[in-house]
Amino acid sequence: MAEVKLHGVWNSPFSCRVIWALKLKGIPYDYIEEDLPNKKSPELLKYNPVHKKIPVLVQGGRPICESMIIVEYIEETWPHKYPFLPTDPYERAMARFWIKYFEEKGPAIWMVSQTTGDEQVKFKKESLEILRTIDDHAGTLGKKKFFGGDNIGMLDIALGCIAHWTEVIEDVAGVKLFEAHAFPYLHAWTQNFKEVPAIKENLPDRDKMLILFKRGREKLLASQ
Amino acid sequence: MAEVKLHGVWNSPFSCRVIWALKLKGIPYDYIEEDLPNKKSPELLKYNPVHKKIPVLVQGGRPICESMIIVEYIEETWPHKYPFLPTDPYERAMARFWIKYFEEKGPAIWMVSQTTGDEQVKFKKESLEILRTIDDHAGTLGKKKFFGGDNIGMLDIALGCIAHWTEVIEDVAGVKLFEAHAFPYLHAWTQNFKEVPAIKENLPDRDKMLILFKRGREKLLASQ
């Protein structure tokens, strides 16, 4: 039994952030799939009483919640192999600034698949602004492959949702968001990100996600 | 001229977080008051093009934005004097968890003064839940004076808004939120927090805030 346990949900980009971090660092762990739509497990409720959400990482019986806080915990617990943050305080602050930006704004992209009509138009507009802002930032990377430099860093892990989920959201919502010609730098980053084995081998199945999210959208439309 | 500059607004709890951090660490700085309701300065727009908000800390010409990211930058740049974070990764993750909780939920408390009727009732309910959750957490402190232990830490700095602004919000909104008997641990913390000279000497004037925020509320009521 591994010392580290992860409670997650297979299609969650937040679970995947933690999986990617553990894989990049080479930390063995046991994975517990939570069945959120049906019943939150007693462990999940015990470990995350404030939010009652996945992912939760448990090490030595102590739970850590919130995906990016878990990723930073992993970084600080196993700092030497595959560092996720630079050492310079200013560069660390810049990574944290963009992580916070995406944590606050990013949910608008998901909401495009959860809304219709004017509301969806509003979330589409917000999503395009977010992608524009991050693409502009990606344009400052120069020859670096990742926001973290030559290797994946904390901001890359945070933005991983864009690389794999946005396409599925577009298909489900019938709305185009992430056009390659409009966001060239972020698109190039997406390709680099998904080529890294720890990422490529740990992305949820696109077709399974599509079926699940389309079923959710059908329910939403039927309820209107 | 100090190497460090802070762009802020006198009544902002977010500016105060940075001021408290600089004072606790004993870092000299120049303060630039921004006149946000009238005109954002060209420096502010240059330094924080994404959010166009205060506070912004500038060191050696390089800007850092977002109050708690600035506080963590201050911690990492001047780590030895008055440390704001413990060294243990788990305890650091716990501090970050609660900071994120309050960053996400806390604005509901301010919104009580910015709304009326059913909307205000909703924000009051949310605010009481937030205070309840943080009071429960404060109840686990035992004999420690602060969330940071014997000294003020990053979470104390984040929660500083509760210690000084909530009372003014209550007066302006005509709504009681932070009753001592309902939230005894958080109240005790408030007293401890406001006794520390770096905090006590750097709290915006209560009466001036009251006048300013009451004027804002009168405008809100007149526009309805």
Image (spheres, coloured by chain):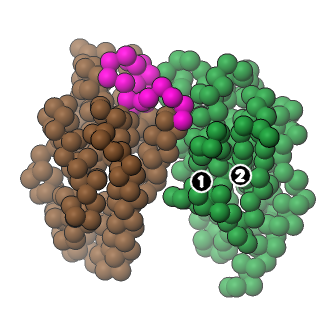
Chain colours: A green, B brown
At label 1, which amino acid type do we have? Tyr
The residue identified by callout 1 is: A47
Identify the image quadrant of residue A92: top right
Residue B82: in magenta span = yes
Q: Which quadrant of the structure image shows residue A183? A: top right
The answer to whether residue A130 is left or right of residue B172 is right
Is B149 in the magenta? Answer: no
Q: What is the secondary structure assignment of the residue under circle 2?
A: strand
Assess whether mark 1 and mark 2 are in contact (beta carbons under 8 angstroms): yes
Position of residue B174 relative to residue A136, above or below, is below
Give the answer, above or below, for where B34 lies relative to A150. below
Q: Position of residue A6 (x, y in %)?
A: 72, 46
Question: Could you tell me which chain the residue with mark 2 belongs to?
Answer: A
Between marks 2 and 1, how big is the CA–CA gap?
Answer: 10 Å
Tell me the residue at 56%/18% (across/down).
Answer: A87
CA neighbours of label 2 inside 10 A, class few (<14), some (14 to 19), many (20+)? many
Residue at disc 1, secondary structure: helix
Q: Residue at x 11, y 57 (%)?
A: B211
For discs 2 and 1, the disc positioned in front in the rendered view: 1
Is A4 situated left or right of B119 in this image? right
Depth check: give the residue in front, A127 or A101: A101
| Range covered by the magenta-colored residues | B71-90
